[in-house]
Image (cartoon, rainbow, N blue to C red):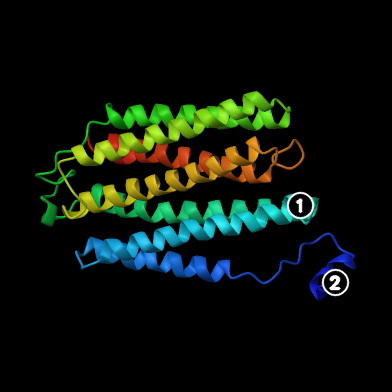
Amino acid sequence: MIHLSQISKSMQRHPFHLVDPSPWPFVASLSALSCAIGGVMYMHAYINGSLVFLSGFVMLLTTMFVWWRDVIRESMFEGHHTGIVQRGLRYGVILFIVSEVFFFFAFFWAFFHSSLAPTVEIGLTWPPKGIHVLNPWEIPFLNTLILLLSGCTVTWCHHAIVANFRNQAILSLFLTILLAIIFTSLQVYEYRMADFRLSDGIYGSTFYMATGFHGFHVLIGTISLFICLLRLLRYQLTQEHHFGFESAAWYWHFVDVVWLFLFVSIYWWGGA
């Protein structure tokens, strides 16, 4: 039996994609809400706060997998991603990145609000007394070089896909993911070696919120690039249709730029 939606799509006279009803936006919203509530509970030492956060995060990862699976099926096997649909998706990714810029703008605002005019409660000085800041020219500078190098390798991969150099594309994307894993590992090591914590006043709050959310974005970007690597190995990214990788590469460049601002403002200037 042919479904009515299939009949309507076969009679479609425009290049736009009318998506089928999907449960994933609702499930993703619930997952994000669970992550937010669990994160707040964990930061305030509530019982099972970390469990709520982890359950929401696992559910969010699962939703990402099944949602992307549906999008890949619509684009690769059902042919719904026409040129005008891809242009709309590009606009959507650009607007998403703009919203992420304002997200991090709030953290920079909080940092500069406290650092440019330190109050008497923190000793009229910045960094506050008792805070032993991290040396910006050790792990932070190394991580800066790693992220800049990963930006080069992901650009290399993009040009290799466009030029149909499959082996170069696979190698460069693998190197990008490897550099991302090294960056995250070094940041975790840095957190473990730091003398201050999230609860140590305004400096700890602004430092860990800004760098921690950036680390979370690095994790999401790494997952996106890993999915692109799997698709590349399965011949799902071609010269004409590789928007999935292109959006992940844009996101990765955004992560690079945010880290440069973090390094200059929080690590170098804010720790002087």
Calculate the distance from the C-alpha at mark 1 to the C-alpha at mark 2.
18 Å
On the picture, is 82 further left or further right than 195? right
> Looking at the picture, how far across and down is residue 262, in whole percent?
36, 41
> Quick check: 220 above or below 134?
below
- Residue at point 52%, 39% (across, down): 253
Nearer to us in this view, 4 or 201: 4
Q: Is residue 115 left or right of residue 97?
A: left
Q: Looking at the figure, which quarter contains the N terminus?
A: bottom right
Which quarter of the figure has residue 248? top right
The residue lying toward the viewer, choosing from 175 and 111, is: 175
Dot 2 alpha-carbon crowd within 10 angstroms: few under 14, some 14 to 19, many 20 or more: few
Quarter of the rendering containing residue 269: top left
User: What residue is pinned by disc 1?
Assistant: 77
- The residue lying toward the viewer, choosing from 80 and 148, is 80
Count residues near mark 1 (Cα–Cα under 10 Å), then give few for <14, some for 14-19, many for 20+.
few
Q: What residue sits 44% from the left and 56% below the top? A: 103
Q: Amino acid at mark 1?
A: Phe
Q: Which residue is mark 2?
A: 8
For the C terminus, give its image quadrant: top left
Q: Is residue 269 visible?
A: no
Residue extending farthest to the front is 1
Question: Where does the image place residue 239, in percent across and percent down from the top left?
Answer: 75, 35
User: For this view, does 136 lie left or right of residue 158?
Assistant: left
Q: Amino acid at mark 2?
A: Ser
Occupied quadrant, residue 24: bottom right
* Label 2 residue SS: helix
- Find numbered disc 1 in the image and state the secondary structure of the residue it sits on: helix
Above or below, 207 against 9 in this view is above
